[in-house]
Amino acid sequence: MADSSGVSAEECERVFKRFDANGDGKISATELGDALKGFGVSTEDAKTMMDAIDKDGDGFISLDEFSDFAKDNRALMKDFAKAF
């Protein structure tokens, strides 16, 4: 079932796991940058996104932080879901 983001919780988790290349339950700046390269996102833009998504400032994106980002960026999440 889709939430207000238009992307289901399962879809969001599936995309999160694709970004989380080493499977440790969090997305590092390197993992985010590597995943976004395929979308033509520059390293600088990936760093900006990392700073925006990483709300607690621990240097990693948790599933909760990623889910919050998904709710605020519906169209982008739909693109990620289609690509992955």
Image (cartoon, grey):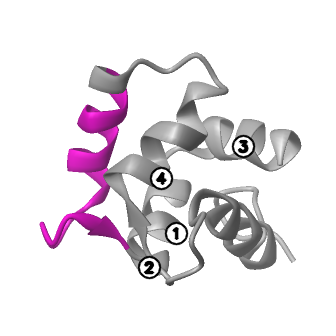
Mark closer to the chain start, 3 or 2 = 2
Q: Position of residue 34 (x, y in %)?
A: 52, 39
Specify the amino acid type for callout 2: Asp
- At mark 3, the secondary structure is helix
Vertical placement of 57 versus 45: above or below? below
Mark closer to the chain start, 4 or 3 = 4
- Which residue range is magenta in the image? 45-61
Pointer 1 and pointer 3: residues touching (CB < 8 Å)? no
Task: Give yes or no for residue 57 being in the magenta stretch.
Answer: yes
Q: Find disc 3 in the rendering and name its residue.
A: 80
- At mark 1, the secondary structure is helix
Specify the amino acid type for callout 4: Glu
The quadrant of the image that shows the N terminus is bottom right
Specify the amino acid type for callout 3: Phe
The disc label shown at residue 64, or none: 2
Task: Give yes or no for residue 83 being in the magenta stretch.
Answer: no
Q: Position of residue 53 (x, y in %)?
A: 32, 55
Q: CA distance from mark 3 to mark 2?
A: 17 Å
